[in-house]
């Protein structure tokens, strides 16, 4: 085991940086908790029968008046905070991950093609990217959200809420991937192994997927992690502003919005616990992203 | 003046300490040029860095002493070392492109350096900077000093770097591969300049290079390094002319001579024994030879080829004038022969290779592969037979193999892509056999490119080219990224394969002596124009073009008397 760690640069760095190990632990725990929420959460916050208004506004166990059944207290509706957070994180992570995957596929596809073909195609794709960059991500997401509300029939709006939100976030994040993929592809295009493949007469799609893509994965992995954090934050922001998810399917952002009403009222846990949870999640993902960047880019250390 | 005794430098890694140089002693007198020669990884640059106390972290000097004119450099603290650096010891780097700050004029850089070490006014500093530039041979220095680094040519830029190193009047200058990035003609001027400085100003030089010709030309004394140790040291003429250590002898044997042609290089068994002609390799050999058209030799001819690139735009309203990369090129590679293509950087050698392989679309001209017309650029379909017949060995073995693919994937790609071998098991067998043929161990097949040295990678690149069953091979500077002993091995390999399989080869190189060893005919290219062409023998013996004569005269080589 020890030798194994020594041989791999990444593992060696990992076991020698406590901050990264803590972040990885936090991230893994949150991901596990979110994935297993239906099995480990004490109650189901979606099930109206499982909570009662009588339990409303109970403080966490360690405060005076806390009840053992609700270890982190309850909100004004009497929902258990632990369950709300686990389910909220589940939804936040689901949206964040899917948005990140869509953005990766779209951005990397367009970016590699732009770098490979160059010329007019490159110019068009990158100008669209530039325009997109000029608009704040949240504005793009708002725009797509608004358009979707306008064109979708009202009965579908509720059921497609999550998909629209995911798409809105994905479309505001793809530019990062496209730019990085394009720049890395330009570098690879000058290398002789790509020339060799072109000279052989291989199909462009094969050259891009089999030859170029594996060689530019390093920086892309870093952006994927960092953008996962951005996607989660963006979702939280949209939900906080009230244009994301409705109050009956709470994500972390929705929980924070609900908690806002109680900020100065003494029931601090309703706001602060989901907020701290979100901060912990985003910080640990970003720390892991920085760690990945160091591993793939030893020169920066 | 400089005395290095029993110096050992270690680099701690997580696998324990790596000893970069061990127990090295050299001394340099004032006005002496001390050459340090050796292959990459021998510790030459580390020695230079240790002397100027600029070892890369985490390297450290673990034993020995470095004494410069009475000062023990190891005893200095960081601040004293900083003051000493530049003032008493200077450095000249390999690449003049990167060792000057592109955002500062030459004047600013010189004045900055002078004022950092001497208490003088700006005007005095400027005057001494201009004097210095004149001394190192920059004409109209008072005007040129205002220029930016990019307005100087490569050789001029290296002169400015030398001026920077000189401006504090140091006792010792460490020149780390000062001419490797330069063309022959410029190299010769820079070497002359170093010699003059050593003689006139009595500056001691440590000249780090891998080029024995350079050492032979200007060094007084030479130390040969190998794996961190000095194996032989002494007067240049004595060490190079009458080498005692077997390694020095092997190194000398591997240097291609300029003045005559030898059949094969004597390759010392430095890297282990080569297993050629074993039974497994026969399989690949048979495979290459079989098939009717395989025995037929195919030549290539190019007629009236013109290539131009879009130039830099100078006005918003006018079309930029085109840059003519190749003009009116006529060459013919006879079937089964080797054509050497020689020229300095920017002469259009690689452009020609790219035109033949279809990466660049020429403006006009015809190409014929054998009897057939070879369509140019994007007119050549992806399935055109020439895509298999013409194969290429690239210059940089570090980028010509996809680092994310295993050797088996890299080598079987041409086999399935060209539909040469259908069954995967036979493909693997063939790849194994081909590895054997190019002198690689068979366990290489499941490794990745980064696990091999440059020379081994170049062998793999040759194997890849051969697995397409080519008739025509383009070698674009195949050995210029390699050490001389490895170069000898690769050149031997190419020679063997060429004679065995009747390949026609276009051999591109800037190194005249390599071309002399490899080519039957040769073409000298300059600024996109053919200066001279003919039989290699004739061109070397009696060059007719002025340019060829100049190239031949300026290529650094060993005096004949030293040859054993």
Image (spheres, rainbow, N blue to C red):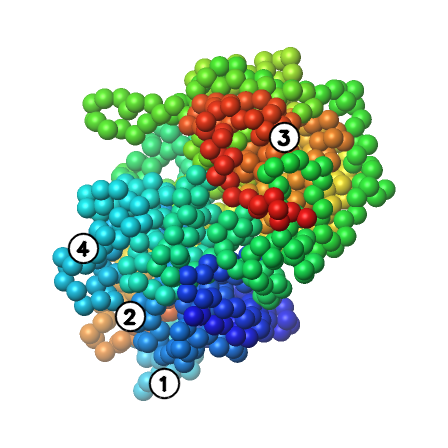
Which of the two marks, 2 or 3, is nearer to us in this view? 3
Which of the two marks, 1 or 4, is nearer to us in this view? 4
Reading the image, the residue beneath label 2 is A271
- What label sits on residue A62 in the rendered view? 1
Q: Residues within 10 Å of mark 4 (few under 14, many from 20)?
A: many
Reading the image, the residue beneath label 3 is B519
Residue that sits furthest to the right in the current view: B279
What distance separates the C-alpha of mark 4 from that of mark 2? 67 Å
Q: Is the Cβ of the residue at disc 3 closer than 8 Å to that at disc 4?
A: no
Query: Disc 3: which chain?
Result: B
The percent coordinates of residue B535 (x first, y second) are 61, 24
Query: Disc 2: which chain?
Result: A
What distance separates the C-alpha of mark 3 from that of mark 4? 51 Å
Is residue B467 placed above or below B233 in the rendered structure? above
Query: Disc 4: which chain?
Result: B
Q: Are marks 3 and 4 on the same chain?
A: yes
Which of the two marks, 3 or 1, is nearer to us in this view? 3
What distance separates the C-alpha of mark 1 from that of mark 4? 76 Å
What distance separates the C-alpha of mark 2 from that of mark 1? 17 Å
| B1 displayed left or right of A245 | right
What distance separates the C-alpha of mark 2 from that of mark 3? 80 Å
Q: Residues within 10 Å of mark 3 (few under 14, many from 20)?
A: many
Query: Disc 1: which chain?
Result: A
């Amino acid at each position: 085991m020890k030798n194994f760690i020594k041989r791999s640069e990444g593992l060696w760095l990992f076991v020698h940086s406590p901050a990264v190990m803590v972040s990885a632990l936090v991230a893994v725990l949150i991901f596990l908790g979110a994935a297993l929420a239906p099995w480990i959460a004490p109650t189901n916050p979606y099930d109206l029968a499982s909570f009662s208004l009588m339990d409303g506004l109970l403080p966490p166990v360690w405060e005076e008046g806390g009840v053992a059944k609700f270890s982190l207290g309850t909100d004004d509706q009497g929902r258990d905070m632990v369950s709300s957070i686990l389910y909220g994180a589940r939804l936040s992570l689901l949206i964040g991950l899917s948005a990140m995957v869509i953005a990766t596929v779209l951005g990397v596809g367009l970016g590699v093609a732009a770098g490979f073909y160059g010329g007019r195609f490159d110019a068009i794709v990158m100008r669209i990217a530039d325009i997109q960059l000029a608009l704040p991500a949240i504005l793009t997401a708002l725009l797509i959200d608004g358009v979707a509300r306008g064109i979708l029939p009202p009965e579908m709006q509720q059921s497609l809420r999550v998909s629209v939100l995911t798409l809105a976030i994905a479309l505001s994040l793809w530019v990062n991937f496209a730019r990085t993929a394009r720049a890395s592809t330009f570098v690879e295009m000058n290398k002789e192994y790509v020339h060799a493949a072109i000279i052989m007469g291989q199909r462009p799609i094969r050259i891009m997927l089999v030859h170029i893509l594996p060689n530019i994965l390093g920086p892309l992995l870093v952006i994927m992690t960092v953008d996962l954090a951005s996607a989660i934050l963006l979702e939280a922001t949209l939900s906080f502003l009230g244009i994301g998810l409705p109050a009956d399917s709470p994500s972390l952002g929705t929980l924070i919005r609900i908690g806002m009403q109680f900020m100065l009222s003494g029931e601090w846990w309703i706001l602060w616990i989901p907020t701290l949870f979100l901060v912990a999640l985003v910080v640990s993902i970003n720390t892991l992203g920085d760690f990945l960047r160091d591993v793939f880019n030893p020169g920066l250390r | 003046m400089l005395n290095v005794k029993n110096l050992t430098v270690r680099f701690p890694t997580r696998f324990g300490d790596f000893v970069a140089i061990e127990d090295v002693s050299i001394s340099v007198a004032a006005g002496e040029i001390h050459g340090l020669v050796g292959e990459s990884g021998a510790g030459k640059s580390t020695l230079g860095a240790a002397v100027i106390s600029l070892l890369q972290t985490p390297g450290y000097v673990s034993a020995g002493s470095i004494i410069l004119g009475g000062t023990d450099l190891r005893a200095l603290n960081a601040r004293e070392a900083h003051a000493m650096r530049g003032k008493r010891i200077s450095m000249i780097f390999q690449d003049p492109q990167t060792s000057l700050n592109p955002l500062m004029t030459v004047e600013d850089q010189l004045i900055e350096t002078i004022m950092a070490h001497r208490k003088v006014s700006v005007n005095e500093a400027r005057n001494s900077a201009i004097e210095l530039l004149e001394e190192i041979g920059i004409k109209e220095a008072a005007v040129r000093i205002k220029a930016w680094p990019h307005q100087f040519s490569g050789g001029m830029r290296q002169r400015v770097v030398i001026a920077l190193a000189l401006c504090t009047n140091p006792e010792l200058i460490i020149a780390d591969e000062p001419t490797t990035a330069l063309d022959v003609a410029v190299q010769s001027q820079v070497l002359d300049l170093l010699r003059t400085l050593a003689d006139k100003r009595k500056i001691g030089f440590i000249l780090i290079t891998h080029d024995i010709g350079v050492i032979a030309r200007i060094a007084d004394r030479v130390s040969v390094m190998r794996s961190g140790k000095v194996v032989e040291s002494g007067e240049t003429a004595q060490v190079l002319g009458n080498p005692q250590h077997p390694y020095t002898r092997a190194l000398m044997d591997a240097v291609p001579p300029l003045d005559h042609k030898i059949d094969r290089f004597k390759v010392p068994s430095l890297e282990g024994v080569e297993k050629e002609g074993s039974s497994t390799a026969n399989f690949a050999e048979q495979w290459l030879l079989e098939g009717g058209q395989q025995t037929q030799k195919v030549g290539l001819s190019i007629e009236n080829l013109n290539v131009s690139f879009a130039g830099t735009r100078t006005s918003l309203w006018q079309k930029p004038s085109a840059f003519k990369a190749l003009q009116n090129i006529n060459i013919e590679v006879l079937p089964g022969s080797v054509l050497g293509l020689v020229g300095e950087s920017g002469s259009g050698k690689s452009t020609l290779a790219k035109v033949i392989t279809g990466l660049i679309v020429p403006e006009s001209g015809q190409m014929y592969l054998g009897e057939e017309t070879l369509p140019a650029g994007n007119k050549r379909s992806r399935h055109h037979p020439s895509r298999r017949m013409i194969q290429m060995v690239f210059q940089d073995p570090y980028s010509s193999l996809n680092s994310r693919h295993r050797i088996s994937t890299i080598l079987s790609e041409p086999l399935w892509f060209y539909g040469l071998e259908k069954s995967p098991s036979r493909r693997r067998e063939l790849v194994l056999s081909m590895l054997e043929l190019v002198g690689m161990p068979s366990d290489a097949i499941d490794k990745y490119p980064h696990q091999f040295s440059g020379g081994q990678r170049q062998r793999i690149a040759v194997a890849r080219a051969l697995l397409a069953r080519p008739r025509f091979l383009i070698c674009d500077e195949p050995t210029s990224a390699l050490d001389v002993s490895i170069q000898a091995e690769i050149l031997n390999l190419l020679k063997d394969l060429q004679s065995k399989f009747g390949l026609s080869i276009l051999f591109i190189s800037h190194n005249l002596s390599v071309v002399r060893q490899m080519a039957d005919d040769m073409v000298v290219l300059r600024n996109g124009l053919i200066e001279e062409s003919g039989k290699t023998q004739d061109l070397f013996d009696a060059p007719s073009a002025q340019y060829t004569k100049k190239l031949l005269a300026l290529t650094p080589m060993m005096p004949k008397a030293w040859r054993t």
